[in-house]
Image: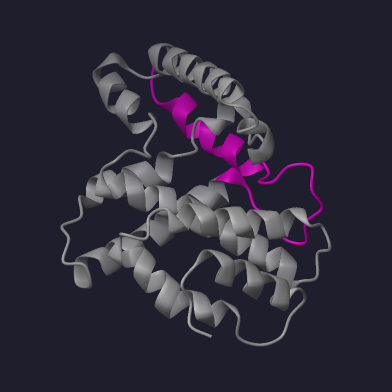
C-alpha cells in the first residue's frame, strides 16, 4: 500500500465541476477551487499578519485550504441549496463523507501516515484563526466565480444568489482584519466599470456590508 490512490484523487478533483447543473461561461473544477482558495488564504493571511499583527500558523492554513474539498472526490460537488436544505440532510451528507474518508485512509494510506491524513482531510473550518480564514476564502472564491458569470451576462439568477450568500457568510467574519480590508480596499474595485447586473450587485453588497459609495 502506497500513496498512489491519494495522488490519483487529484485527477478526480479535476474532473468534478463546480456548480453542477447550471449553465456557465467559465467552467471551474474542484481542483481549481482548492488551488484558488489556497491562494486567497495566503493573501488573507498576509493581511492578518501585516495589518492585524496576528501570528499565522502557515502550515495549518495551507493544509486546510489546499485539502478542504479533497473528500469531494467521494461524493462530488453537491449543490449548496441541496446540501444545506435541512440540518438533517447536511448531517447525513457529512456522515457519508466522513465514513468514506475513514475507509479511504484505512485502505489506501500507509499506517505510518494515517494520523496525518486523518487530520489533513478532516473538516478544516473550525474556530482557529486559520479555520476562520478558510471559511472566508472558500466563499471569496465562490463570490468571484459568481461575479465572473454575472459580468459575462449569464442570465441565471442563481449567480446573484451565490454572490449574495457569499457576502453574507463573509460578513459573519467581519471581526477579522483581513475581512475588513477586503470590504474597504478590494471589493469596491470589483464594481469598477460597467457590466450586466452591476446595479443589482451593488444593491446586494450595500444591503449586507458597510461600504462607501
Residue 183: x and y in percent read: 44, 72
Front position in the image: 33 or 133: 133
In the rendered image, the vertical position of residue 150 relative to residue 126, given as above or below: below
Q: Quadrant of residue 21?
A: top right
Q: Nearer the viewer, residue 126 or 2?
A: 126
Residue 90 left/right relative to 173? right
**Horizontal and vertical percent position of residue 156:** 82, 57
Query: Residue 193: image x %, image y %?
Result: 66, 88
- Identify which residue is drawn at 48% across, 50% down: 138
Q: Where in the figure is residue 31, as x and y percent of width and height?
A: 55, 46
- State which quadrant residue 205 falls in: bottom right
- The residue at the point 39 percent across, 32 percent down is 123
Residue 101 in magenta stretch: no
Q: Nearer the viewer, residue 28 or 56?
A: 56
In the displayed orientation, state which residue is furthest to the front: 207
Q: How many marks?
A: 0
Residue 201 seen: yes
- Please give the name of the residue rendered at 42% of the width and 15% of the height, measured from the top-left corner: 102
Q: Is residue 134 above or below residue 95?
A: below
63 or 171: nearer the viewer: 171
The span picked out in magenta is: 1-30
* Horizontal side, residue 91 vs residue 67: left or right: right
Point out the image quarter for the N terminus: top left
Q: Residue at x 30, y 60 (%)?
A: 176
Above or below — where is 90 with respect to 36? Answer: above
- Visual colour scheme: one colour
Judge left or right: residue 15 versus residue 100. Answer: right
Q: Is residue 27 visible?
A: no
Amino acid at each position: 500500500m502506497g500513496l498512489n490512490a491519494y495522488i490519483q484523487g487529484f485527477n478526480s478533483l479535476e474532473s468534478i465541476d463546480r456548480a453542477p447543473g447550471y449553465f456557465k461561461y467559465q467552467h471551474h473544477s474542484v481542483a481549481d477551487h482548492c488551488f484558488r482558495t489556497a491562494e486567497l488564504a495566503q493573501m488573507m493571511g498576509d493581511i492578518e499578519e501585516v495589518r492585524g499583527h496576528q501570528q499565522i500558523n502557515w502550515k495549518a492554513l495551507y493544509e486546510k485550504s489546499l485539502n478542504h474539498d479533497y473528500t469531494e472526490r467521494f461524493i462530488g460537488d453537491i449543490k449548496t441549496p441541496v446540501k444545506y436544505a435541512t440540518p438533517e440532510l447536511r448531517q447525513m451528507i457529512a456522515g457519508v463523507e466522513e465514513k468514506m474518508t475513514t475507509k479511504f485512509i484505512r485502505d489506501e494510506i500507509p499506517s505510518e501516515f494515517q494520523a496525518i491524513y486523518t487530520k489533513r482531510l478532516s473538516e478544516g473550518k473550525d474556530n482557529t484563526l486559520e479555520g476562520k480564514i478558510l471559511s472566508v476564502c472558500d466563499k471569496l472564491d465562490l463570490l468571484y466565480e459568481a461575479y465572473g458569470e454575472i459580468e459575462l451576462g449569464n442570465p441565471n439568477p442563481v449567480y446573484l444568489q451565490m454572490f449574495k450568500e457569499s457576502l453574507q457568510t463573509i460578513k459573519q467574519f467581519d471581526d477579522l482584519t483581513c475581512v475588513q480590508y477586503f470590504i474597504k480596499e478590494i471589493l469596491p474595485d470589483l464594481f469598477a466599470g460597467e457590466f450586466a447586473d452591476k446595479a443589482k450587485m451593488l444593491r446586494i453588497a450595500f444591503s449586507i456590508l458597510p461600504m462607501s459609495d
